[in-house]
């Protein structure tokens, strides 16, 4: 990991008189290296989709612990592997090219906590949908996961036996997972998407980078979505929904990463979101994953709201704007 530290006095967001760090301020080319981007995407998709085909042909159950581990190692880590290989073949620094540095720790921390607000917004939006209500029947969610009634009752008893309110306990567990095991899994994606790809597409500016990355990111998920991941009841519609969700969430990922000047922001955001996302299904009832799932309708709507928050911060709070469409310099 990088060991860069940032003196607040030299930080453009803290000192309005400083040169904006989030915009390109050097003489490097403002042209996208299409050959390099193409090589990265070909390798990332090739590894992921080949592994998905093997998983399908061997009939691996994605709902089991072994299936999840296999998807993590062979599918989710493909973008990181591709990024490392492409940087190595280009004789360029992996740390520099992929933003693998400490960056601005305050923003890394904000990114880690942001999924709490995102999930709260999802639940708030969910209750506005027809027939959707808030529930605290934890056993119903566990039964939907395939647990027996006895297993569900035991899990609920353990959850309610703690001195903390169940919702607080679940949030803390999700955040801790976002810093640990989930972060390890998320880094496999983010080193590619918000690392190499963000850096290489940065001449296009904030909105184009986010839009292109979101579409690529969504389509990349297609093979495992079609196998029942996230949307087991509607896999084909799930591909469309997942792509829409990735496009909606991409600006938030881009904003937090550029503000933090580190791919760790996207990693911890992604890890915490994966740890907390199921809470929309825990606390909402009356509809399926396409509507109330974390990457369903409520997730897309909440992501749009969070994007508005990012733009408002950029325009009215931050000393330098990055959502103007001008070229970005993601690592400062």
Image (tube, grey):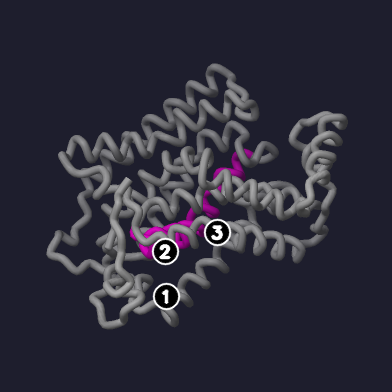
- Residue 78's disc number: none
Q: Residue 155 location, x and y as percent?
A: 80, 36
Between the residue at mark 1 and the residue at mark 3, the CA separation in whole angstroms equals 19 Å
Residue behind mark 1: 314
Task: Give how far across and how far down residue 278 sits, in percent.
Answer: 67, 47
Q: CA distance from mark 3 to mark 2?
A: 14 Å
Q: Are marks 3 and 2 in contact (CB under 8 Å)?
A: no
Percent x, y of residue 296? 63, 52
N-terminal of the pair, mark 3 or mark 2, is 3
12 on left or right of 303: left
Residue placed under numbered mark 2 in the picture: 255
State the extent of the magenta-drawn residues as a range.
235-261
Which residue in the rendered view is the most extreme toward the left?
Answer: 27
Label 3 Cα neighbours within 10 Å, binned few <14 / some 14-19 / many ≥20 = some
Query: Residue 89 or 248: which is nearer the viewer?
Result: 89
Q: Is residue 271 above or below residue 50?
A: below
* Residue 254 on the magenta span: yes
Which numbered circle lies on residue 113?
3
| Quadrant position of the N terminus in the picture | top left
């Amino acid at each position: 990991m990088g060991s860069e530290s940032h003196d607040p006095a030299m930080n453009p967001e803290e000192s309005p008189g400083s040169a904006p760090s989030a915009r390109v301020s050097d003489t490097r080319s403002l042209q996208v290296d299409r050959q390099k981007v193409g090589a990265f995407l070909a390798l990332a998709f090739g590894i992921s989709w080949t592994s998905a085909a093997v998983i399908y042909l061997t009939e691996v159950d994605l709902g089991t612990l072994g299936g999840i581990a296999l998807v993590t190692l062979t599918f989710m880590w493909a973008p990181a592997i591709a990024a490392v290989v492409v940087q190595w073949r280009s004789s360029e620094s992996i740390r520099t090219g992929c933003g693998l540095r400490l960056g601005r720790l305050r923003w890394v921390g904000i990114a880690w906590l942001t999924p709490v607000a995102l999930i709260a917004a999802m639940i708030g939006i969910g209750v506005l949908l027809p027939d959707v209500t808030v529930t605290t029947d934890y056993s119903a969610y566990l039964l939907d996961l395939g647990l027996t009634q006895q297993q569900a009752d035991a899990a609920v008893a353990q959850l309610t036996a703690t001195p903390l309110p169940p919702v607080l306990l679940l949030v803390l567990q999700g955040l801790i997972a976002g810093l640990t095991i989930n972060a390890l899994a998320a880094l496999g994606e983010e080193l590619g998407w918000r690392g190499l790809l963000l850096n290489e597409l940065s001449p296009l500016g904030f909105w184009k980078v986010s839009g292109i990355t979101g579409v690529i990111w969504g389509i990349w998920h297609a093979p495992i979505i079609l196998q029942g991941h996230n949307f087991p009841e509607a896999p084909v519609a799930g591909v469309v929904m997942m792509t829409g969700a990735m496009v909606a969430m991409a600006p938030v990922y881009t904003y937090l990463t550029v503000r933090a000047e580190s791919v760790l922001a996207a990693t911890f955001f992604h890890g915490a979101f994966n740890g907390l996302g199921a809470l929309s299904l825990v606390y909402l009832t009356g509809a399926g994953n396409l509507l109330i799932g974390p990457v369903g309708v409520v997730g897309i709507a909440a992501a749009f709201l969070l994007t508005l928050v990012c733009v408002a911060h950029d325009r009215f709070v931050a000393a330098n704007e990055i959502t103007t469409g001008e070229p970005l310099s993601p690592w400062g």
